[in-house]
Image (cartoon, grey):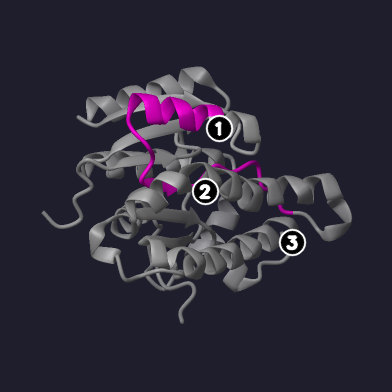
Amino acid sequence: MPFSLHNRVAWVTGSSTGLGKSIALELGKAGAKVALNYANNPARAEQSFADFTAAGCKGILVRGDVTDPEQVQQMYAKIANDLGPVDILVPNATPAQPQKPIEEYDWAFYQSMLDFFIKSPFLLTRACLPHMKKQKWGRIVNIGSEVFRRGVGNFSAYVAAKGGQEGWTRSMSTELAQFGITVNLIAPGWIPVERHENDPQDQKNGYLSLVPAKRWGVPKDVATAVVYFASDESAFVTGQSMAVNGGMTVG
């Protein structure tokens, strides 16, 4: 079957809610055994994992901070022991992203963005690489954002970190291509999930009015793109940034 991930092991960080939850589900439906990761709110994570298994998917739930080197290694060891070494890595975990003018940010907040979108992929990839290199097959799918291409203002810390994440993706793609490992990035538009429930409706209406597709994106739009990048069918595609945003950015 095309896009089958049978016998593959996937690790999706930040997957107890939002885009990550949908990504884990679609990878599971495609046949992968999936490690769902969370850092906070155990009750929510357990419910998400129950939803995942109720859909007939197989995997485990792991708790840990993806910006902490020791916890990343501990999580990888558990995944490798329970499911097998990781073939597909999806660094998706994200902190809160308040939009502010630069005068209202401090360096600690900037650093938190870099920790999640550059440090975390670095730590996760370093944990997964030995197995991927040994078997000459691996998939790393970063979750970026359209904000980098759009240059969204009053959002400098997040936009800068997402730009760095895209640069890291490009560099790693050429470094790892010889080992049969692809590194790509998906740049979603604004896709309302749980953390957007209290966002002002006028902001949502304003954004939607700009989308050429004239509809909101949904988490599955991103998740199915991840399945493509994770599959054998994308073996000759690496170093790419795919916008999943209904035409908000082109080219």
Who is closer to the viewer here, 239 or 27?
A: 239
Residue at 77% x, 51% y is 110
Residue drawn 77% across the image and 48% down it: 111
Give the residue pinned by disc 2.
125
Q: Is residue 235 left or right of residue 111?
A: left
Element type where label 3 sits in the image: helix
Residue at which label 1 appears:
73
Q: Please give the name of the residue rendered at 58% of the width and 25% of the height, measured from the top-left corner.
A: 40
* Viewer-nearest residue: 104 or 26: 26
Question: Element at badge 1?
Answer: helix
Amino acid type at mark 3: Ser
In the displayed image of the protein, which residue is found farthest to the bottom?
251
**Which residue does the numbered mark 3 point to in the structure image?**
156
User: How crowded is the residue under tag 2: few (<14 C-alpha within 10 Å), some, or many (20+)?
Assistant: some
Q: Position of residue 146 (x, y in %)?
A: 54, 65
Q: Which mark is residue 59?
A: none
Q: Is residue 245 visible?
A: no
Query: Is residue 67 placed above or below 135 in the rendered structure?
Result: above
Q: CA distance from mark 2 to mark 3?
A: 26 Å
Amino acid bearing label 2: Thr
Q: Tag 2, which secondary structure?
A: helix
- Residue 81 counted in the magenta span: yes
Callouts 1 and 2 close, C-beta under 8 Å: no
Q: Is residue 165 above or below residue 250?
A: above
